[in-house]
Image (cartoon, grey):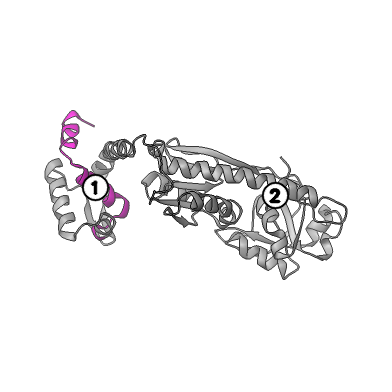
Amino acid sequence: MSEFDKNKLRRLDVALRLIFLGILRHGKASLVADELGLTAPSISHALTRLRDIFDDPLFLRRPHGLEPPAFARAIEPDIRAAVEALQAALAGPDAFAPSTSTANIRLSARDSEVAATLPDALCRMFERAPNLSLSVQALTSSEAITGLLEGSLDLAVGFFGKAHDDLEPTSLRTESYLVAGRAGHPLLQGPLTLEKYLQADHALVASDASRHGIVDDKLAETGQARRVVLSLPQFLPALAVLSRSNLIATLPARLVEGHAERFGLVAKEPPLALRSFDIRILRHRRDLKNPAVTWCIEQIVKSVKGVLRQARIWSAGHSEAGAPRARRRR
């Protein structure tokens, strides 16, 4: 960016910067007006000011909305950086007062994490911060990362692989797998062998309706395959289906440990080696000094530690001969 363009950027007040970023994100002036609590004429006036300052159209009208040309995308990083610096400064280093906070935390988590991680964490948080509120969305990993980067999310819980450089990860636990099916399932009597595993009809949880997952990749390495007859988008409905059918499913161990008894399921170790994966909380680095976000992360981490202790007790009590076994492999 030229020095001339940087001088123009300095002429932008906070409202103009927010409106510019909002148009980039939504592509529609009406959505930006709703998001910022402004009127349509005020958005129109702001766009005129932006165009006058830069002597550039900035956004082109298309049938689907306003489209940013190359110049608008080129100046976006500088405008975004200025807004994020201001947000960080406003957050400040002040201590968080849970008992009086009315903060709303926007969080992304799939139903497996809502069921396995959040119940105890939410009880802990609401006991200490009764006026706090949380908005939870079930987003894919890529959608959650986009939400954090764009500022529509404060936290995301799940498996994310390599985190974006602008996102700060906090480890929660290492997760592995268990095979679950209804109590009395004929193939889940005694040790679960690979032969019995391949005889079964399987259910798979996949947000994209796929019937192929990590298990199928592992089996393919040795020229084997299982029969996946059902693909579901969420984990808890899968547990309900397992409880009333002869299907089995290979699911995150913590989810099974926490809900096997409730759904009348038994759990077995998979008869093949499956890699474990890390469950983490992500936040944007602009929120590193946001005391509400930091406090929420601390509460989730503490509750997960307590849940893991209970899981180890549960596993030890169910590892006797003839009982469901739910010991996690590290």
Q: Magenta: predominant secondary structure element?
A: helix
Q: Give the residues in magenta.
A: 1-30
What residue is drawn where x is 57% and y is 62%? Answer: 233
Label 1 packing within 10 angstroms: few (<14), some (14-19), many (20+): many
Amino acid found under the numbered disc labelled 1: Phe
Label 1 SS: helix
Upstream in sequence: badge 2 or badge 1: 1
Using the image, determine if residue 298 lies above or below residue 184.
above
Quadrant of the rendering where the N terminus is positioned:
top left
Q: Which residue is mark 2?
A: 177
Residue 166 x, y percent position in the rendering:
42, 37
Closer to us: 174 or 23: 174
Disc 2 from disc 1: Cα separation:
45 Å
Using the image, determine if residue 313 lies above or below residue 200.
above
Amino acid found under the numbered disc labelled 2: Tyr
Q: Quadrant of residue 3?
A: top left
Label 2 packing within 10 angstroms: few (<14), some (14-19), many (20+): many
Residue 134 x, y percent position in the rendering:
44, 54
Residue at the bottom extreme of this rendering: 244
Disc tally is 2
Q: Which residue is mark 1?
A: 20
Label 2 SS: strand
Residue 257 as seen in the image, left or right of residue 187: left
What residue is drawn where x is 46% and y is 46%? Answer: 155
Residue 37 as seen in the image, left or right of residue 139: left
